[in-house]
Amino acid sequence: MTPTRVEASSSATNTATKSSDSSPANTEATNNREAVALLRRLTYGPRLGDVGWLNTLGLHGWLDAQLAPDDSADVDLKRRLDALKLPIKYAAGPNTPAPNGVVQSWPAVDEQGQLMYVQAPIETAWKVVDRSVAMDNAARRRPRDEVIAATLLRAVYSRWQLREVIVNFWHDHFNVDAYSSDQITAALPSYDRDVIRAHAFGNFREFLEAVATSTAMQFYLSNRSSRAGAANENYARELFELHTLGSAAYLNDRYDRWRDVPGALNGKPSGYIDQDVYEAARAFTGWTVADGTRVDNRTQLPNTGRFIYVEGWHDGNQKRVLAQDFDPFQAALADGRKVLDLVAAHPATANFVARKLCVRLIGASVSEPTVKMAATVFRDNRQRSDQIARTIKAIVLAAEFDKRAPKIQRPLNAMASFVRATGMDFTPSEGLVNQLSGCGQRLFGWPTPNGFPDDDSYLISASALRQRWGLMLGLANNNWKNGTIPIALLEQLNVLTPEAASGYWLNNLIGASSAQQQHAIAASTGWALDKPVAPPGGERQKRLARLAGLCALVPEALLA
């Protein structure tokens, strides 16, 4: 990245292989339990055709294709994103003075609008930050709403499903709360597109700098206001604790001088202490955002929303971080970049990041040998452009992956896997987003820097499970206008009795079914067990769809 500088008045081979076919003519049933279980962990669940794609390529070939995604081949998703329209509705604005003293108002709006911000540069969205421009709050939150809608659509329709799963992982790892300020809302499309998605399978050191220089993180962890003589420690502390070395490497409870940390005198400290955080915070002073702030009496920053470096705000004096001395008055950005070099290369970072990836892909009970193996791959490939992809591949191909323990699906995963398994022609909606929030997953709105927890206990409270059941049945009943479940294939296959239809949906959802499960689900409806659920028509569609919702409530369907 080449930053704007302001002086203050002085791989894996890309494999183009046919993915799942969205055509109604595709009649493959996902009845391979092992393949379905694998796809439920590494994707948002299989669509018709995905099991065949996996079996044709084999796991190695499938991974290679997924880890080198070709967006030009994702034709169906692009078409849907281009066609997606979101409602925006608000009343006429009051004739009240804006902050600049000018009385402004806006007309009432009630329309469907295409996505304006998801692919646009940050300058386009930055206008929602300007409080001197009168607009309804619905218009100010539009950049965030668009990213949420695009995320839901990608989870359902992207052929590069593993990337969607890992993008979600990195959004948790480098969490920002897009509900906490207009600035982060405006920056979210760029953060999702240019930072998280662009680096999800790439080099971790490059990823760190993209995050550090992102407008979203600059505002979320307050580094934009960090100045020489008044360094803000928020970003530096989370860089060490949450982004790189991890809390287990925080040694200030045992050592309060850098030279006392084991290995420090040899230039290889085993962990970090508060002194490292303080000094790193000084290294990032002057890293800020072009938001129109005045630098001094003669210089004012542009108001573009982009990252910018202000020389006059940087503390150029000597520093020491992780037992490494920083010479004074280095070139622009050099101090911060040296910090990023040090934390990216530290062995604790490899262990911390590898462990989090293992927990996400294998489970919380992952063994230490597997974590160590993944950390070694991560560390040995730190100079490679596909460092993260290589680490993920090593984890998935590890013997322990085949013995992974079931995990409770996150609400987003549960929603997307249900839609994919049923073949619903899906459209995102505000009602669905609100239901996901009710289930405990407010997309891009986790309030603390640690991100959405990768912890089953958070997802299995009585309230969370009730909301989850409501999510599945609401989707089946089209409560939020997301789409109806097609039944043409069930009619073609003549699986129209309650038990037969239950078996069909269970096979699609979890890859297998039992006569006991089918009978229990069918009996719960009160419908005749030996006859079609209803005559042809709308009532048949509703009842077959409801059976899909009931099948999604079995314990196995809540797991991945």
Image (spheres, grey):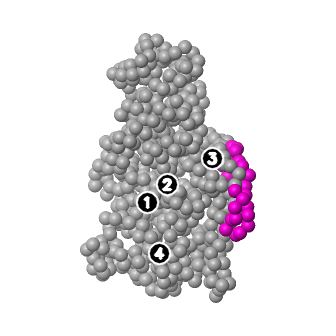
Q: Name the foreground residue: 121 vs 388.
A: 121
- The residue beneath circle 3 is 72
- The residue beneath circle 4 is 232
Q: Name the foreground residue: 159 vs 529.
A: 529
- The residue beneath circle 2 is 445
Disc nearer the start of the sequence (3/1): 3
Q: Amino acid at mark 2?
A: Gly
**Above or below, 188 relative to 314:** above
Disc nearer the start of the sequence (4/1): 4
Q: Secondary structure at mark 2?
A: loop
Query: How far is the residue under mark 2 from the one under mark 1?
Result: 9 Å
Q: Amino acid at mark 4?
A: Asn
Q: Amino acid at mark 1?
A: Thr
Instruction: Give the image quarter of residue 247.
Output: bottom left
Q: Name the foreground residue: 517 vs 86.
A: 86
Residue under the image location 58 percent in, 47 percent down: 150
The residue range painted magenta reads 94-121
Q: Are marks 4 and 3 in contact (CB under 8 Å)?
A: no
Tell me the mark number nearer the camera, choosing from 2 and 3: 2
Q: Position of residue 429 (x, y in %)?
A: 58, 41
- The residue beneath circle 1 is 448
Query: How far is the residue under mark 4 from the one under mark 1?
Result: 17 Å
Q: Are marks 2 and 1 in contact (CB under 8 Å)?
A: no
